[in-house]
Amino acid sequence: MTRKPNQSLRPGWTTGACATAATRAAYEALLTGAFPDPVAITLPRGQRPSFALARSRLGDGTAMAAIVKDAGDDPDVTHGALIVATLRPAAEGSGVVFSAGEGVGTVTRPGLALAVGEPAINPVPRRMMTETIADLARAHDAPGDVAIEIAIPGGETMAMRTMNGRLGILGGLSVLGTTGIVTPYSCAAWIASIRQGIDVARDAGLSHVAAATGKTSEAAVRALYDLPEVALIDMGDFAGGVLKYLRAHPIPRLSLAGGFAKMCKLAAGDLDLHSSRGRVDFDWLAGRVAGLPGAAPVIAACGRANTAAEVLEVARQAGVPLADRVAAKARDTALEVVGDAVAVETLIFDRLGRLVGRANG
């Protein structure tokens, strides 16, 4: 994940907002015979954006409208995707019924906000679409019983770049969004996936999960404990996101795994481990080994090194337990956030996946 430096960045629209706009256009066409273009919707916080239609079709008792998603300046996997809503009248009294079309996933594991077997259209987008149906039904004195199919052509391939498979959402993407607006580089979708991963693990009755900063540390901690995939939380840089959610939704045991540099940041008290938040504090790092036998070359390395990995290698050669010291401080930081409801250990792996530092109390 790459973040841009602070600058004026253009916001975008969530898949849920696009699906709602396509739904509104299609339902209006069912009721009046004409598609509004552009089509305006009301977002959860009251904003009123308009969306241009990319495609539309009316006939055989159905209406289809499609919108190209614009995620603004956010590196969203679905930027440029076509969000398609196909509507048809439903049985009297059925209300609004949702189904997954091409490229929209289906929930296969318990623990999410949706029941197993449901299309992966999240609660807020469902509410937005239901409310826009009700609004138009009132305006046109219609019953409001509608079947809505949401499709995202190519979504199954796009979903391979998300955490859906691990969460048990199979066959495509999720239709997401709580505000309707994508804030560039807020990484809200990543944090939402972290929370969903914890929810799925809790519902599965797991007593031990592992949150890792990257693929190398994830593979290493999984092998160390022979953990199932559902126990793995793709934390990335968001240690705070994991720890704060676990404080409110505890699991008995947490292994926090990462590379040396990122764990140095956690040890120093940072909960956002991204490089844009600053470099490793080498003076702080030198203080971790001050007074230990053989620490002189490590302290000297802290004064001249360009990377934390260089210091770690000097410590390794000198037999100084620098990584263990860092792991212990990282555990202290984690415990300050998560409290005593979760037993925390911290594991530091090198770039080859070898365990070089550990603290478990």
Image (cartoon, grey):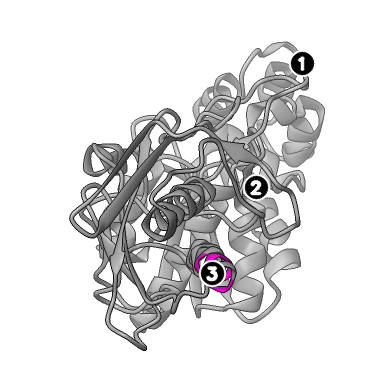
Q: Which corner quadrant holds the C terminus? A: bottom right
The crowding category of the residue bearing disc 2, from other C-alpha atoms within 10 Å (few below 14, some 14 to 19, many at least 20), is: some
CB under 8 Å between discs 2 and 1: no
Residue corresponding to mark 2: 325
Instruction: Report whether residue 145 is seen.
Output: yes
The crowding category of the residue bearing disc 3, from other C-alpha atoms within 10 Å (few below 14, some 14 to 19, many at least 20), is: some
Instruction: Using the numbered discs, state the Cα–Cα distance from disc 2 to disc 3 in whole angstroms.
Output: 49 Å
Amino acid at dot 2: Arg
Instruction: Using the numbered discs, state the Cα–Cα distance from disc 2 to disc 1 in whole angstroms.
Output: 18 Å
Residue corresponding to mark 3: 127
Q: What secondary structure characterizes most of the magenta part? A: helix
Residue at 37% x, 57% y is 30
Residue corresponding to mark 1: 303
In the image, 11: left or right of 18? Answer: right
Give how far across and how far down residue 8 sits, in percent. 77, 21
Q: Nearer the viewer, mark 1 or mark 3?
A: 3
Span colored in magenta? 133-138
